[in-house]
Amino acid sequence: MATLKALRDRRKTVQSTQKITLAMKMVAGAKLRRAQENVEAGRPYAYVMGQILRDLAAGAQALETPQPLLTGRGQDFVHLLLVATSDRGLCGPFNSSIVRQARKLIEELQSQGKTVQICTIGRKGRDMLSREYGELIVESFTEVGSPRLRYSDAERIGDSILKMFEDGLFDVCNLIYNHFKSALVQEVTTQQIIPVPIENGQQIQDKSLKAIYDYEPAEEKILGQLLPQNVTVQIYNALLENAASEQGSRMTAMDNASRNADDMIRKLTLTYNRSRQAQITRELNEIISGAEALQ
Amino acid sequence: METFPFTLVSPEKILLEKEVSMVVIPGLKGDIGVLPNHAPLLTLLRPGVVRVYDGAEVFMQIFVNGGFSEITPEKCVSLVTEGTLLEFLNKSTLEIEIKNLLEDIEISKTREEREQVGENLDIARAKLMEILTHEKMQ
């Protein structure tokens, strides 16, 4: 049985850990509110952009000059996975769920005989993936969006991805991130950003329902500007979603940790009091029996 | 008066979401006045001012750095990289900015660098132009 001092010390340790987790929970809560506002403000842009591009992609067969960013190169041998995680840990299953999804996808693609390349955003993703797939990582970005995520951060990543695409280093690019639903629920999402995905069925629907656009300037020129921008916008959106998800996940994790610490403190206090009482009883017993022996 | 929903968004936030009677957007080849039931159009925007009309009055003037607009008979959506209220632009700071950018062009080495600075210069010049025409009108 642990001595009283050891029990006291342990209780103290748990108490100070709880103080830290409570503080972290509060900080995450405050950051979450800001991140949530940002993600909600950023969604319309990415959504409308995606919408317009999907419409365009559906009608892209008619284009005179092919747009590889829109319709692809007609091959899919090399896949680039853009894995977006956080720089810091202690945020529950946030990073591991993204990495798990990435692993699954890598194995799936490799079993189909495709070449996989990885580009990581965030330190955690890089660290977790480099153990197994270190030689596949072609690029990694860390300290993105600290202290505050800006559009230019996404531009930096987008530019280097586009450069790699232009150099013909990959054919298909998928983006893996956590979609923010609420502080409790985040959903790992895989989104294809190059080429723009065309959903089945949409194509037919579009032709009958959608008005045919006039373009100013010509279609090709607009697309030439829109398509690269779309890549950046989708990355920016993913980073916003990730930022909010990270804080939400951390808040939940820290809330759980604080609760667990509470339980532990209660149990330790009980054990402490019991053994203290046991010791007092034993000492009294010894005194009384000693006194009795003298009579 | 007939109105239609107009949405102006930047990647960082929704700048305006409102039922309007008319908007004038800075199309690449000239300003486009959009009324309800406009023919479907997808256009790039040059740096310039979006004028939002509520009835016959100008309700809001926003300078945008460029982007694009989707116009359908029912609605108009403009996606811009950045938007600032025209009132917030300042003539003297812009003049200094233009001067600095001109110096930057002189010292820039690569072609990309020059293009980048040139773009910023276009935006700054367009801003200044808009302020001057705005002043003249008043």
Image (cartoon, grey):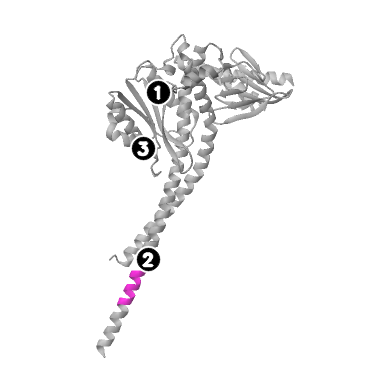
**Please, what secondary structure does the residue beneath circle 3 have?**
helix
Question: How far apart, in angstroms, are the residues tagged by discs 2 and 1?
Answer: 58 Å
Q: Magenta region's main secondary structure?
A: helix
Q: Is mark 1 on a helix, strand or loop?
A: helix
The magenta segment: A272-282
Amino acid at pointer 1:
Ile
Q: What amino acid type should be assigned to the residue bearing mark 2?
A: Leu
Q: Residues within 10 Å of mark 2 (few under 14, many from 20)?
A: few
Does residue A72 show up magenta in the picture?
no
Task: Give the residue pinned by disc 2.
Answer: A270
The residue at 32%/73% (across/down) is: A278
- Label 3 sits on residue: A124
Characterize the local packing of mark 3: few (<14), some (14-19) or many (20 or more) Cα atoms within 10 angstroms. many
> Left or right of A282: which side holds A232?
right
Q: Which mark is residue A268?
A: none
Q: Which chain carries label 2?
A: A
> Which chain does the residue under circle 1 lie in?
A
Is the residue A284 above or below the residue A174 in the image? below
Residue at screen point 37% across, 15% down: A74
